[in-house]
Image (cartoon, rainbow, N blue to C red):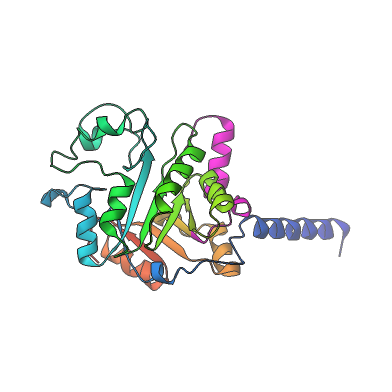
């Protein structure tokens, strides 16, 4: 075997080993995910515009409970530090008004209605009080303007008082790193999406790519991966599943054909626009 070939093989072996270590999820002292794995999860609740049930509303959460679905909800924090359930970066699509959650007080938000209905933007505490452990909950933390630590801290204060089954997840690896340090006993999931951009600085774009490629797992040690259904064949995800047997969630499942494919593959379903 020639020297160049030996060098090439050594580089390949080293790269493979480093890649496997970088994407390594939590291995020891893992929390129990069995209850979460039993459920299909309604994305932002079991909402239905035709029935005037807006997404991330108390009505949508009640409908999910009634149908026996787990609930995936999104959380942001208001200007006065209250975690509320709302997904979008801006208010206009769901409320018809300008502004953002982060620049509004809770008092401001409680004057708004969702999608022309009587439904209001719920606080995380209100939503969890309604759910009350009846179904498991996935709480996705939506970071804005670098508020990852404050968002994690204030959301944690609410979750600490909740006795039902839940998991926290985020597209931002810094949220998972915070929970790893402060609440390692919580179930945490890394959400992965190559289309996500937390900013336009070169560093932000690099970190977003590394997070989507699961190459920062060694810092966050996730318990599951929530991946965009279009990216479910990524090499890093394959390594995670093949080497470490990490559970996977697929979002967003919007057809019954995709639902059957995902369930057959042994993944947890986060669905929208269908009734499994």
Q: Residue at 71% of width from left, 55% of height from top?
A: 15
Q: Identify the image quadrant of residue 6.
A: bottom right
- Nearest to the observer: residue 258 or residue 157: 157
Q: Is residue 207 magenta?
A: yes
Q: Identify the image quadrant of residue 129.
A: bottom left
Left or right: 90 as drawn, with respect to 46? right
Q: Residue at 26% of width from left, 65% of height from top?
A: 256
Q: Which residues are magenta?
A: 196-224
Where does the C terminus fall, quadrant-wise? bottom left
Q: Residue at 33% of width from left, 39% of height from top?
A: 88
**From what the image shows, is residue 244 above or below residue 176?**
below
Counting from the top left corner in percent of width and height, residue 201 is at 55, 29
Q: Residue at 87% of width from left, 61% of height from top?
A: 2
Q: Is residue 42 magenta?
A: no
**From what the image shows, is residue 96 above or below residue 195?**
above
Counting from the top left corner in percent of width and height, residue 47 is at 21, 53
Counting from the top left corner in percent of width and height, residue 151 is at 45, 40
Counting from the top left corner in percent of width and height, residue 33 is at 45, 68
**From what the image shows, is residue 17 above or below residue 92?**
below
Q: Is residue 140 visible?
A: yes
């Amino acid at each position: 075997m020639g020297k160049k070939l030996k060098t090439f093989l050594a580089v390949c072996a080293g790269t493979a080993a480093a890649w496997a270590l970088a994407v390594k999820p939590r291995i020891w002292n893992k929390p129990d995910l069995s209850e979460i794995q039993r459920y299909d999860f309604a994305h932002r609740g079991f909402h239905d515009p035709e029935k005037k049930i807006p997404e991330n509303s108390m009505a949508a959460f009640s409908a999910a409970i009634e149908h026996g679905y787990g609930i995936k909800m999104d959380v942001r924090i208001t200007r006065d530090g209250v975690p509320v359930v709302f997904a979008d970066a801006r208010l206009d699509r769901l409320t018809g008004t300008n502004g953002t959650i982060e620049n509004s007080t809770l008092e401001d938000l409680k004057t708004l209605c969702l999608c022309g209905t009587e439904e209001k933007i719920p606080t995380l505490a209100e939503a969890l009080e309604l759910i009350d452990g009846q179904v498991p909950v996935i709480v996705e933390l939506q970071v804005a303007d670098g508020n990852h630590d404050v968002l994690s801290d204030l959301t944690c204060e609410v979750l600490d008082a909740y006795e039902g089954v839940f998991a926290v997840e985020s597209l931002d690896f810094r949220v998972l790193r915070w929970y790893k340090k402060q609440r390692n006993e919580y179930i945490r999931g890394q959400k992965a999406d190559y289309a996500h951009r937390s900013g336009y600085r070169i560093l932000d774009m690099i970190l977003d790519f590394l997070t989507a490629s699961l190459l920062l797992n060694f810092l966050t040690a996730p318990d599951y991966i929530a991946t965009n259904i279009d990216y479910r064949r990524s090499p890093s995800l394959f390594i995670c599943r093949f080497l470490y047997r990490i559970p996977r969630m697929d979002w967003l499942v919007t057809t019954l054909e995709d639902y059957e494919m995902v369930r057959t593959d042994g993944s947890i379903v986060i669905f929208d626009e269908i009734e499994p």
